[in-house]
Image: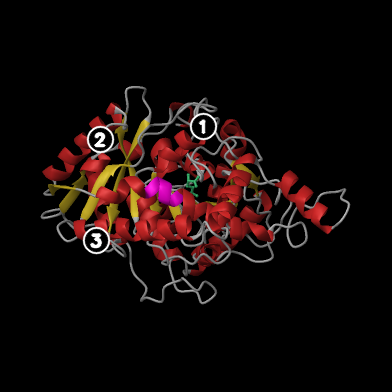
């Protein structure tokens, strides 16, 4: 029962076969014992979780519980949680306790979800492997010598090991979808602006997108329905009517047009991954879908464009960590400038410093037009490629990542190799459109493969529906790593 999906747990809580306190306690024990080897959590809040679980039981008893009331959740440690430490995986914020909660944290709490703890991540969400954390690397539950993907690796690993039925993440270039693929779970990145960024510690503001991890597309739909919504405190939050993201789950795939970009099926992707995706496409066509070959000629420029725009925005956002306003401050310094320098030298890790250097350079006078402005122009061309493709198809499908999980330490000395992990996901952030990665098989090493289903802006319900129909006829999403079964 413990390892069940949200929909199943919700049923057990509603019928009172299981109490919210029993569920919370059992999962807290599981995190403490079974979870210890993964380093997926930075903070576990046993006392707080049990108190919230009691309140959720009271809501069930009073008859005003919803589908998520009493369901435990963990939040990526980039999302602020009032009264509970928020580290962002950094020494800079090692002891930072946020004065308020992120919008999405508040929304999920209002739905009655029980916050169990904060998950480990790459420092300031910069990375694709969750090795850049000040708190040490996260390990992949399928093989603890491997990375779980990143930057939301703690959330992905925790859901994969069934330590928690749901976890939040943030996706700036792939940080939900890529770890979902490498860890064998579902990871949904909604349209930019659908979930407020208020209280999400900023990395690259025009790309940062809160989203979720869960076992099934159905669960992702439930979570997104609860966490979406307009919020005046984020100027890019969209004011749109509320949606039920589960509305297309039962919709048949008859007539669905799937675009297959040739750029997603070329060299550079492991053959085991391509085989699994081809199998999945056969399943989808059996369900009534048709496939169309398409091309996204500019998508190959996504990685270079991203590594101008994201560092530029990061260098500006991270200037707030100056030793005065938040977190760490160097103990010894000569004067104000020296205090800034020592604080930032001590507080930030190597990858964060690399991004700040690159970002400051591309924004500097004389280089702005050549790099930042040019990158924004190419970003537009990439977006136009997608709009053209969506004239002839409903969704775009391909691999989420060119490789399955790789050994810890394998790519840490070669940043460009690490950056190429997100080659299929970054375009979704540059355009702002939604995508979900779902498990679709295993490679010859027995490692999970993720399939990326992308849709045009605001097509979350449709891509969730496609994922759900696929999950009705396959069971990849139910496979659990042996040690955690
Ligand atoms: N791996 C990418 C990076 O390092 C994306 C990270 C993310 O989505 N937060 O920037």
Magenta part of the protein: which range? 302-306
Whether 303 is among the magenta residues is yes
What secondary structure is marked by label 3? Answer: helix
Say which label, 1 or 2, has the lower sequence index. 2
Residue 228 appears anywhere in the view: yes
Mostly what secondary structure, the magenta segment?
helix
Q: Residue at x 68, y 46 (%)?
A: 348
Q: Disc 2, disc 3: CB below 8 Å?
A: no
Q: Quadrant of residue 42?
A: top right
Give residue 258's position: percent from left, percent from top: 18, 50
Say which label, 3 or 1, has the lower sequence index. 3
What secondary structure is marked by label 1? Answer: loop
In this rendering, position of residue 473 left or right of residue 135: left
| Residue beneath disc 3 | 387
Say which label, 2 or 3, has the lower sequence index. 2
Identify the image quadrant of the C terminus: top left
| Of marks 3 and 1, the one in the foreground | 1
- Separation of residues labelled 3 and 1 (CA atoms): 34 Å
| Residue beneath disc 2 | 266
Residue 209 appears anywhere in the view: no
**Mark 3: C-beta under 8 Å from nearest atom of ligand 1:** no
Viewer-proximal residue, 315 or 99? 315
């Amino acid at each position: 029962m413990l390892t069940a999906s949200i929909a199943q747990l919700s049923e057990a809580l509603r019928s009172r076969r299981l109490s919210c306190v029993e569920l919370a306690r059992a999962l807290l024990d599981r995190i403490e014992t079974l979870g210890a080897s993964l380093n997926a959590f930075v903070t576990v809040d046993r006392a707080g979780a049990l108190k919230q679980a009691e309140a959720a039981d009271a809501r069930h008893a009073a008859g005003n519980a919803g589908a998520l009331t009493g369901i435990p959740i963990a939040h990526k440690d980039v999302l602020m949680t009032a009264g509970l430490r928020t580290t962002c995986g950094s020494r800079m914020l090692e002891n930072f306790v946020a004065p308020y909660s992120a919008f999405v944290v508040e929304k999920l709490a209002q739905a009655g979800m029980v916050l169990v703890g904060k998950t480990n991540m790459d420092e300031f969400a910069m990375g694709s492997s969750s090795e850049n954390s000040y708190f040490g690397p996260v390990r992949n539950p399928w093989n603890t010598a491997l990375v779980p993907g990143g930057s939301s690796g703690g959330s992905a690993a925790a859901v994969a090991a069934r330590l928690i039925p749901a976890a939040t993440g943030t996706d700036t270039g792939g940080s939900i979808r890529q770890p979902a693929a490498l860890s064998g779970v579902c990871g949904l990145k909604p349209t930019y602006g659908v979930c407020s960024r208020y209280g999400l510690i900023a990395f690259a503001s025009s790309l940062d997108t809160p989203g979720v991890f869960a076992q099934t597309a159905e669960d992702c739909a439930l979570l997104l329905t609860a966490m979406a919504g307009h919020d005046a405190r984020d100027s890019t939050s969209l004011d749109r009517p509320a949606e039920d993201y589960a509305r297309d789950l039962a919709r048949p795939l008859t007539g669905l047009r799937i675009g297959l970009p040739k750029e997603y099926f070329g060299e550079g992707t492991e053959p085991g991954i391509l085989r699994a995706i081809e199998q999945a496409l056969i399943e989808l066509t059996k369900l009534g879908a048709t496939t169309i070959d398409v091309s996204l000629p500019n998508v190959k420029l996504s990685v270079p464009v991203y590594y101008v725009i994201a560092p530029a925005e990061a260098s500006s956002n991270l200037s707030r960590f100056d030793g005065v306003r938040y977190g760490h401050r160097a103990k010894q310094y000569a004067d104000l400038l020296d205090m800034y320098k020592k604080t930032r030298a001590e507080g930030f890790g190597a990858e964060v410093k690399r991004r700040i250097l690159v970002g400051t350079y591309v924004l500097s006078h004389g280089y702005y037009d050549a790099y930042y402005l040019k990158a924004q122009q190419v970003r537009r061309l990439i977006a136009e490629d997608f709009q053209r493709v969506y004239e002839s198809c409903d969704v775009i499908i391909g691999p989420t990542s060119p490789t399955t999980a790789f050994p810890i330490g394998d790519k840490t000395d070669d940043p460009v190799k690490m950056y190429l992990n997100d080659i299929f996901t970054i375009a979704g952030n540059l355009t702002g459109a939604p995508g979900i990665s779902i498990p679709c098989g295993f490679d010859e090493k027995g490692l999970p493969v993720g399939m990326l289903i992308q849709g045009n802006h605001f097509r979350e319900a449709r891509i969730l529906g496609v994922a759900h129909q696929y999950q009705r006829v396959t069971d990849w999403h139910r496979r659990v790593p042996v040690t955690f079964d």
